[in-house]
Image (tube, helix red, strand yellow):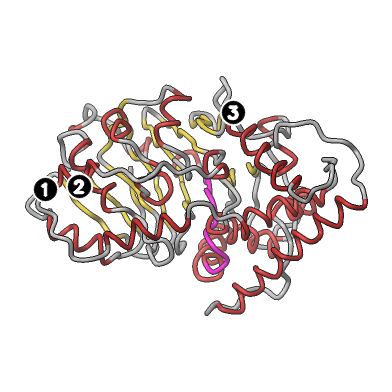
Amino acid sequence: MGKENLREKGISKESEIWIEMLPANEGDCILITIPREDIRMLIDGGTSETYTSCLRERLLQIKEKGKGLDLLVVTHIDNDHIGGIIELLKENGSFAESKIIRIQNIWHNSYRHLQFHKELATGKAEKQILQKIVAQGVSQEMRQFAQGKKEISALQGTSLAALILQGGYNWNLHFGGKAVKKQQEKIRLGDVCTIEVLLPGQEELEELAKKWKYELKRSRISFQFSEDKLFDDAYEYYYRFSAQENVGEKKQISARLRGNEDIKEIEKLAERQGKTDSSKTNAASISLLLEYRGKRILLLADNLAGKVMENGKIGGIFDAIKLPHHGSVRNISDGFFANCVTEKYLISTSSEKYGHPDIETLAKIIVWGAKYPKQIFFNYEIDKVKEFEKKVKSDKQLDIVYLAKGQKIVL
């Protein structure tokens, strides 16, 4: 399948980009390398098991070559995105003395980056409530590890925010230490590569702040919000373990599509649309546009794809699109596929926990995507995707690729 379907011929290997979707269970762990510029960027770390099973080994391979990460982006604090990064930073030590890999910059929005005024001190009543939230989160974390098959490091109960602070890492340095959010300027990595933050905007951060304030004020005291680091921990643990919004409906949609449903009319399947994802943490996750020597890669976290287009006026031709929220139909509109055109879609999920991707999403790619051959890359083999593939095998416009461990997508 030639690039001439989208662009003129003549782009040399000088513009080559490598993308690795590491096996991250239900989450994301994406390593991007621009070999000519010697740039490496890691987006999310999957679950804790992701780190022990593959991410640690991959990072040590990079370190052995005398290289590091130019940028680590933690898109949001769902456990399937943050768990592996926490394990990495626990073992890595610090920015100055990195045991696993040098990390030049970290982008991550914590409580301290939410958009509202904070006092300097925290009262006794507030501290008691925050400590209870942290304790509940640590307890949940320990239960999950006890049920796991892989051995995880003994030290638990440390938030990502605390690890970044303790390690002295460059935290949101490109944004003056404030929130990673949409702005006019693009961030430059190296001489040629640029990154544009598409989401969150001010609105998404303010909505997340409102939700967090509401949750704490349900304690029935007049809550005073301060700069105390305990707020970072409580905020992170609450959203990692206690507030998994919309999970019930995700399972319901996926269960309905797992059977051997006879897909006779792809158009009808493509018209199905689940209830829009209402998660405030997903809406405030960090979505990016990476550009390098004429190539454009859309890296959507767990946002609403339509919101990315609305806020960023993003559209046109892309060399690859990492679909939002592991291919959930609740995060993708028909108009997105019509306006954001690519040959290569990326979906990161094992499908085991929430049943992603939704089959409707795959149908929408066929129906609403541009009329040229398209590829969908997965980092796991998924039974219902294979079943769907069999039913559309006569459609030469679609090629589904299951990546082997360590296999790169070369753009």
Question: Picture quarter containing residue 73?
Answer: top right
On residue 265, the disc is 1
Question: Picture quarter containing residue 349?
Answer: bottom left
Outermost top residue: 184
- Ranked by sequence position, the earlier of labels 3 and 1 is 3
Q: Is residue 379 above or below residue 105?
A: below
The answer to whether mark 1 and mark 2 are in CB contact below 8 A is yes
List the residue tagged with mark 3: 203
Quarter of the image with the C terminus in it: top left
Left or right position of 92 against 66: right
Q: Tell me the element at label 1.
A: loop
List the residue tagged with mark 2: 269
Residue 201 within the segment the image draws in magenta: no
Question: Picture quarter containing residue 357?
Answer: bottom left
Q: What residue type is labelled 1?
A: Glu
Q: What residue type is labelled 2?
A: Leu
